[in-house]
Amino acid sequence: MSGIEDNVLVERAKKGDRDAFDQLIRKHEKRAYQYAFRLTSNPEEAADIVSDAFIRVFTAVKNFKGNSAFTTWLYRILTNCFLDMKKREKNRQATSLESVMQTDEGEFERQIEDDGPTPHEELERRERERSVQDAVTRLPEYQQAMIVMYHGEMLSYEEIAEALDLPIGTVKSRLNRARLSLREELVPDEELFKLG
């Protein structure tokens, strides 16, 4: 699968092959950005995290031993960049996805094309998503990373354990605590999640 190809590219990059490093970036930049965006809900912050992460990968690739998959190592670096950014910018606010966008033609509001759900159903869905995203951002940063890695990126316990350099038992207990914390954060909005 892609793991073998990553190993070949990493080995070439370790020897100073800039083209191999560029191929690694192109191969993983979209998924790295998606992960960073899920953590931050902010396109600029996500792009900053990814840029910082790839700079760190570039400077540290010579020391990559290959004990884990390249993607696992990349997730660890991305998570560390996210945690570092949060330490530096504790009070910075994220921009809403529903805000006005600035383009060359002027300003416009983001709109959702109606392809099925009623406006009421769409509003409820958006409120639930916003409620969950807001609740996730109120969690401690490590809990945010755990929730996004497991539920957003669909990583296994083993992959999270490797990425965060933690025992699997610790990952399971911390993820469970993160879920409980998330549930507590969602209590004020529990009406949004009732079925029927």
Image: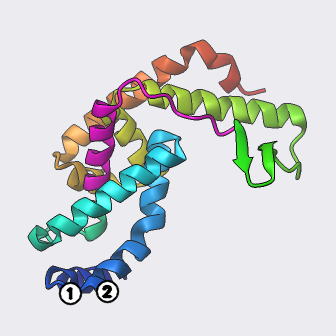
Q: Residue under circle 1?
A: 12
Classify residue 56 by image quadrant.
bottom left
At label 1, the amino acid type is Arg
For the rendered model, the colour scheme is rainbow
Q: Residue at x 54, y 20 (%)?
A: 186
Q: Is residue 32 left or right of residue 8?
A: right
Q: Earlier in the sequence, mark 1 or mark 2?
A: 1
The percent coordinates of residue 103 (x first, y second) are 73, 51
Classify residue 53 by image quadrant.
bottom left
Is residue 74 rendered magenta in the image? no
Residue range in magenta is 76-98
Residue 10 visible (yes or no): yes
Residue 68 visible (yes or no): no
At label 2, the amino acid type is Asp
Residue 69 lies, with reference to residue 141, above or below; the image says below
Residues at circles 1 and 2 in contact by the CB criterion of under 8 Å: yes
Q: What is the secondary structure assignment of the residue under circle 2?
A: helix
* Mark number, residue 19: 2
Q: Is residue 122 left or right of residue 173?
A: right
Q: Nearer the viewer, residue 139 or 94?
A: 94
Image quarter of the C terminus = top right
Which mark's residue is nearer the viewer, 1 or 2?
2
Classify residue 139 by image quadrant.
top left
Instruction: Name the residue furthest top.
Output: 188
Q: Nearer the viewer, residue 58 or 145?
A: 58
Is residue 88 rendered magenta in the image? yes
- Tell me if mark 2 has few (under 14), some (14-19) or many (20+) residues whose alpha carbon lies within 10 angstroms of its own: few
